[in-house]
Image (spheres, helix red, strand yellow):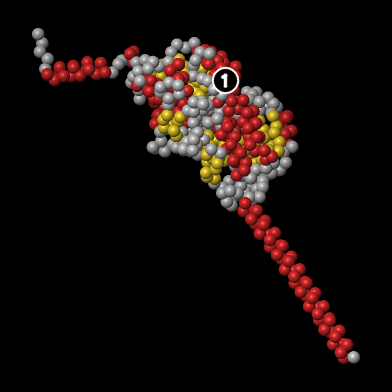
Amino acid sequence: MRIYSGNYMVLLLAFFLVRMELPSAADIPTYHVGFLSPSPDSAIPAQLAVEWNSAFLVALEVLNSERNSYQLEAVSLNSACDYQEAALASMKLSKKSGLIGVIGPACSGAAISASNTLLSYGIPIVSFAATASVLSSRSLFGNFFRTVYSDTYQASAVAASVVKLNMTNVTLLYTKDYYSFSLAERIGELCGSAITRSELLEPGVNIPIDIKQLETVLNSIERKEIVLLVVQPAVAEQIWKTATDLNMTGYPWWYFGTDGTTAFEPAVAEGKVAERLVVALQGEIGLAPFDGDFSDSSACQKFYTHWKEKSYAGLPATDTNKSRSYVPYLIDTVTLFFEIVDALHGAAIEVNASTILAALNGSGPGSPQFKGCTGVVQLDPDSGSRSVSPNQPAVYNLVSLLEDHWELKGRIENGTFTTLLPLTRPGTFSAAEQDLVTSDSILPSRSENRVLIATITILFTSVVLVAAALLYIHKKRRNAAKVYVELVQESH
């Protein structure tokens, strides 16, 4: 019989103990999460679609690497930012065994379709970019959630911009898709008489808009008007191409876009048309979602480090001025599922679509709240949207287009500006103050009003003084004449 040394026996015992503590890959449960991915040939710009697909993959890899008790596995299907495509893809996902939920899609119309399809199967769906207000209805979309804010808050941010930047004579352009139509309607209600005209562009839903109609609308716009674009990125590109062809970019025209518009970046478009747009659109402004902090201490840093190490396509610049639309919100949405599964595992509760749905709507354990790329992520059970409070406001960035990115110019929290840097109207005139758009403002700014009042006061005072002087001279002459007459009479 062979006799083992004491050290060898200790190592052998440790090996078996480790094997008992760490299950093999075959023993680790795997849960499936669907991803209704965007496609480059839809309303989403090709570069942004690439970024979102890479961001989803990166988030899944990083978060799986941090777990040894379970893994999440992706089942990705293309939604094409289209109502019918999203319904078909959702139907396929619902047949997948072990599916605990679905992430996406980005577009509101596709999200409405996907939610309707998955609802009958009790499968939750969480979007990172679908913002249409109607999706907050719990009676219609009880299985739908989002890590972004409803467009109710974006409409308030637009209205705040209209007031702060002294905008009047605003022409609003929109289309019939769910995002554009409902957001434009709410903006019209909040902005009132500042919106002097609203134009519905046809057809505009994953189909090129009517260029003839657009040309007619643009040609009728008067100088100094603001053109408010409440449209998807692909439509924004068509509008700006047409405006460039008509030589209607830069001074005296100015375009202001919602987050769908600022998701399009001329610098990453294709062909020589992009070069023209980059030159033509400098200084155009709009709203973008708050993208979080990408400093070394950021909760997002590990994802961007992994993204860079893997050389995946579409890595965004890692700072607040250059991060593109909703990439951090997608990472937070993936993190949300991991946070819920962690909590369910900790409570020894079975992980399935039903328990995930209960956690999301607050009716069961595992309701998530965590610090993510975009701040504290928590869902409001009454709307399914990201929670909003004085301590956790709905934040939007006011941005201005430079050659290769949208530059941060202001911050709006719950419909109120907290910061605003000077803006430059395209082609002319720097702002003199933070609350002054340009020296050629649409409306006089407060400083201009003060100058105007002072000028009127000076003119009025001058007129009074001149009148008083004339009256004094007139009286003096009359007195002199009277004295002269009296002297003449006395001499006789």
Q: In which quarter of the image is residue 82?
A: top right
For residue 296, say whether it is visible.
Answer: yes
**Tag 1 secondary structure:** loop
Quarter holding the N terminus is: top left
Question: Which residue is at a point 14% across and 20% down the rendered structure image?
Answer: 7
**Would residue 4 appear left or right of 314 to someone viewing this image?**
left
Q: In which quarter of the image is residue 472?
A: bottom right
> Would you place residue 18 above or below residue 222 in this image?
above
Give the amino acid type for the residue marked by disc 1 in the picture.
Answer: Leu
**Would residue 426 appear left or right of 57 to someone viewing this image?**
right
For residue 335, say whether it is visible.
Answer: no
> Would you place residue 284 above or below residue 57 in this image?
below
Residue 418: x and y in percent read 52, 44
**Would residue 349 appear left or right of 466 to someone viewing this image?**
left
| Near-viewer residue (31 or 268) | 31
Quarter holding the C terminus is: bottom right
Question: Which residue is at a point 60% across and 49% down the rendered structure image?
Answer: 436
> Would you place residue 377 above or below residue 435 in this image?
above
Residue 297: x and y in percent read 39, 37
Question: Which residue is at a point 78% across and 72% down the rendered structure image?
Answer: 471
Residue 395: x and y in percent read 51, 37
Dot 1, how many residues are within 10 Å of its Cα: few (below 14), some (14-19), or many (20+)?
A: some
Q: Identify residue for label 1.
A: 140
**Residue lying furthest right in this view?**
492
| Near-viewer residue (194 or 247) | 194
| Near-viewer residue (308 or 110) | 110
Residue 93: x and y in percent read 50, 14
